[in-house]
């Protein structure tokens, strides 16, 4: 009997130690929430240091603050500084009061159609920069339903609501214009209706076209810009230019912030996704013409390409990357039969060019976000579930379930805090490991 008790005691101790070492199981503590009447399109956050009593008066719970913050009576809270809905763009102060708003419906827009010219409504398209510091508002004044895009004004705002610059009466493509992380310029691709796609460069000095014909010296072939991204500080940007007729004639172009070409590199692989991971590198996913696998490559701001020939991944339309030291954590889902997704997690070592499969599982939803929250741990999100995954012992745990008919997603993460949107409700959770 004593031996059985001793064995049981040792098992309990061992289990406790494993639980203490495994931080992949975390507890989410709700600390603040807000519901909006309009459909939420996007949100930008800022942070402010406030008195805890002041924060509680705003609706924040005591659990939002750590011991040191409670001791000194002050803490840092995130707040909505920009809320984008279908109806308007609103700028807020830290108390949650609206400072100004811009209605997205524009009256008196002149539209051209097959039936002729008519005057009607238009909608302001808005895009935020990757770092959330700037907004680009494309305000239509006239346009065409024949696939020729819109014409109007482009206005760049800082997230505190200050207008930085504007250009008026310019071509707006299809209104999808992305500001740079430094707010000094913005980029747009031509609408899909154009067989030969150029790229548009906007600044306070006006607009100019970055011609794909300048990239291609072969008059028998045509290239079209397919994607772009910024090195985080906006000092450089990258564009991919795929051949219309030949998948073996694709190019990677690096520009400086003035839209001048720094380098052009040719590759015999078709380029699918590009993603900025820090100030120094862009990660590319490419595919050989006859291959079903994606290959990874890194490009620096001088245009030097480092191919990882032995890092081959299943082909997926959407990929999500997370830099973890010298590794890339890659998350994606491939749709299978009967609305089942095959979700994958890979870890690619940038230096050694090794790639390992960390997780392969089936679910009714694909992963749509990945963030790091502690050493060797990440949080993943699908529409109705939150997971933690330990990169060391590869344990996957569901930590939060939402109703299937609701659309939920991680929209931001801060120190020990995660922000989740569920339809028109935004919830703030503080998270910590269950030790």
Image: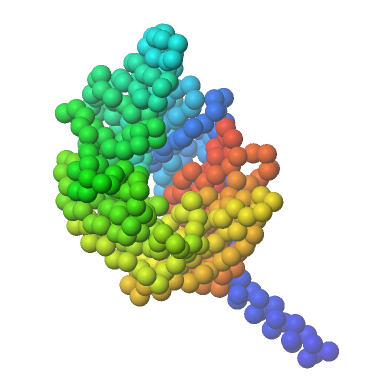
The furthest residue to the right: 1
Q: Which residue is drawn at 68% across and 39% down?
A: 405
In the image: residue 431, left or right of residue 203: right
- Residue 402 at x, y = what percent? 66, 45
In which quarter of the view is residue 343 placed?
A: bottom right
In the image: residue 291, left or right of residue 247: right
Q: Residue at x 39, y 35 (%)?
A: 192
Residue 129 visible in rendering: yes
In which quarter of the view is residue 83 placed?
A: top left
The furthest residue to the front: 220
State whether residue 3 is above or below residue 54.
Answer: below
State whether residue 225 is above or below residue 348.
Answer: above
- Residue 377 at x, y = what percent? 50, 64
234 or 101, which lies in front? 234
- Residue 386 at x, y = what percent? 59, 52
Q: Residue at x 38, y 19 (%)?
A: 144
């Amino acid at each position: 009997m004593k031996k059985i008790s001793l064995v049981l005691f040792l098992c309990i101790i061992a289990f406790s130690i494993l639980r203490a070492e495994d931080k992949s199981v975390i507890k989410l503590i709700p600390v603040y929430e807000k519901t909006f009447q309009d459909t939420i399109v996007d949100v930008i956050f800022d942070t402010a240091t406030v008195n805890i009593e002041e924060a509680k008066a705003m609706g924040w719970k005591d659990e939002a603050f750590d011991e040191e913050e409670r001791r000194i009576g002050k803490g840092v809270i995130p707040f909505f500084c920009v809320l984008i809905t279908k109806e308007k763009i609103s700028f807020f102060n830290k108390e949650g009061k609206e400072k100004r708003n811009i209605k997205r419906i524009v009256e008196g827009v002149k539209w051209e159609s097959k039936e002729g010219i008519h005057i009607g409504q238009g909608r302001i398209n808005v895009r935020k920069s990757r770092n959330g510091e700037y907004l680009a508002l494309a305000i239509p004044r006239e346009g065409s339903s024949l696939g020729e895009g819109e014409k109007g004004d482009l206005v760049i705002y800082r997230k505190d609501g200050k207008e930085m610059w504007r250009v008026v009466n310019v071509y707006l493509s299809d209104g999808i214009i992305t500001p740079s992380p430094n707010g000094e310029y913005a980029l747009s691709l031509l609408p899909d209706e154009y067989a030969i796609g150029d790229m548009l460069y906007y600044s306070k000095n006006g607009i100019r076209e970055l011609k794909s014909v300048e990239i291609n010296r072969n008059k028998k072939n045509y290239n079209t810009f397919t994607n772009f991204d910024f090195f985080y500080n906006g000092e450089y940007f990258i564009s991919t230019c795929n051949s219309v007729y030949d998948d073996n004639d694709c190019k990677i172009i690096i520009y400086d912030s003035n839209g001048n070409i720094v380098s052009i590199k040719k590759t015999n692989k078709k380029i699918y996704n590009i993603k900025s991971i820090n100030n120094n590198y862009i990660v590319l996913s490419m595919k050989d013409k006859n291959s079903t696998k994606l290959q990874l490559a890194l490009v620096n701001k001088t245009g030097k390409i480092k191919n990882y020939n032995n890092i081959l991944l299943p082909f997926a339309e959407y990929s999500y990357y997370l830099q973890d030291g010298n590794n890339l954590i890659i998350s994606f889902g491939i749709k299978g039969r009967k609305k089942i997704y095959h979700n994958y997690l890979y870890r690619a070592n940038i230096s050694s060019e090794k790639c390992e499969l960390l997780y392969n599982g089936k679910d009714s939803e694909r992963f749509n976000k990945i963030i790091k929250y502690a050493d060797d741990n990440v949080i993943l999100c699908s529409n109705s579930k939150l997971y933690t995954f330990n990169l060391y012992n590869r344990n996957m745990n569901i930590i939060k379930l939402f109703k299937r008919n609701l659309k939920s997603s991680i929209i931001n993460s801060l120190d020990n805090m995660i922000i989740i949107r569920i339809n028109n409700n935004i919830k703030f959770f503080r998270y910590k490991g269950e030790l």
